[in-house]
Amino acid sequence: MALLTREEIIEALERLGELAHAQGQPIELVAVGGAVMVLAYNARQATHDIDVAILSPREARIVRDLAKKVAAERGWADDWLNDGAKGYLVGISTGAVIFSATGIEVRAPTVEQLLAMKLSAWRDDVDISDARRLLQEIGSQSNRDQIWKRVEPYLVPGDQLKAQYAFQDLWDTVYGNA
């Protein structure tokens, strides 16, 4: 699937909201990953898909079915909207609303949770670039130890040591050894 631009993400979410509204099933999502970096932080131009946690309706199947309709209309893969990143979610923090339209509201987790997810994944240059942007978002507000204490509760069990080393390396790259 081609990369989804900011404009395409917004159009698709608006259409998803229209379909949900028509069925009387308003949708509440928490977006994570690339879509948040595109919509909330303007950190990149596009993303492969939209990773979400579905808060409402309770039956995730409803959202998946509506997302498939949007995919068919746009000629996209059915998984353009998916919950594939849920393995990196340790709880769900409440961050800012990053998109709202009739029938749909999309929030981001807190910056600390997003950073924890990126540090836990730490797979490629995209994760590293996103983590750098997120650290810059909160880094000037606190020192390294204070930020780590706010990030640590959201780390994926089993990935804590990798995330800690990634955080230290990232901090040194962005702020030096201070």
Image: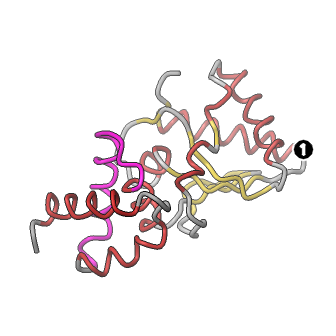
Q: Residues within 10 Å of mark 1 (few under 14, many from 20)?
A: few
Amino acid type of disc 1? Gln
Q: Is residue 142 left or right of residue 8?
A: left
Q: Residue at x 10, y 66 (%)?
A: 176
Up-down relation of residue 43 to residue 4 (above or below): below
Q: Residue at x 40, y 53 (%)?
A: 118
Q: Is residue 4 left or right of residue 122?
A: right
| Residue at the limit of the structure toward the top, as seen here | 75
Magenta stretch encompasses residue 136: yes
| Residue at the limit of the structure toward the left, as seen here | 177
Tag count: 1
Q: Is residue 126 left or right of residue 92?
A: left
In the foreground, 143 or 169: 169
Q: Which secondary structure class fits the magenta region best?
A: helix
* Badge 1 element: loop
Residue 96 % position (x, y)? 53, 66
Residue occupied by mark 1: 23
Instruction: Give the quadrant of the C terminus.
Output: bottom left
Q: Residue at x 63, y 38 (%)?
A: 81
In the foreground, 86 or 70: 86
Residue 127 % position (x, y)? 35, 46
Residue 22 % position (x, y)? 87, 43
Residue 103 % position (x, y)? 77, 51
Range of residues picked out in magenta: 120-141
